[in-house]
Amino acid sequence: TSYEVASFDTIVYGNGTGIYAYSTEALVQGNTAYRNGIGFVGSVGGFIMGNRAFGNSVGISLQGGGGATAEGNVVYANN
């Protein structure tokens, strides 16, 4: 599969939303999100795989639009 938007090996912190995967063309993989409102958001078919989320209000949120996928993530110590 080919993706038009991708985020790999990024560290995000201190934001409302760490990384937002919006579209079946979006792949978010191998990233770390901490101290955000929401670490990762998937919507409209986005793929969130193999990431780490901790210390956020919400670790991973799959939202409206359907079809988003979250697999193989490590999520801990979120509120």
Image (cartoon, rainbow, N blue to C red):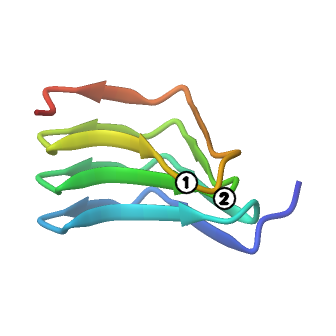
The quadrant of the rendering that contains the C terminus is: top left
Residue flagged by tag 2: what amino acid is it? Answer: Val
Residues packed near mark 2 inside 10 Å, few (<14), some (14 to 19) or many (20 plus): some
Residue flagged by tag 1: what amino acid is it? Answer: Gly
Identify which residue is drawn at 54% across, 26% down. Answer: 72
Q: Any mark on residue 3, and which?
A: none
Q: Any mark on residue 64, and which?
A: 1
Q: Is residue 70 left or right of residue 38?
A: right
Q: Position of residue 21 (x, y in %)?
A: 54, 61
Q: Is residue 60 left or right of residue 62?
A: left
Identify which residue is drawn at 66% across, 48% down. Answer: 66
Q: Position of residue 3 (x, y in %)?
A: 77, 65
Picture layout, residue 75 above or below residue 14: above
Q: Position of residue 53 (x, y in %)?
A: 29, 39
Identify which residue is drawn at 17% across, 56% down. Answer: 37
Which one is nearer the viewer's eye here, 55 or 7? Answer: 55
Which residue matches tag 2? 44
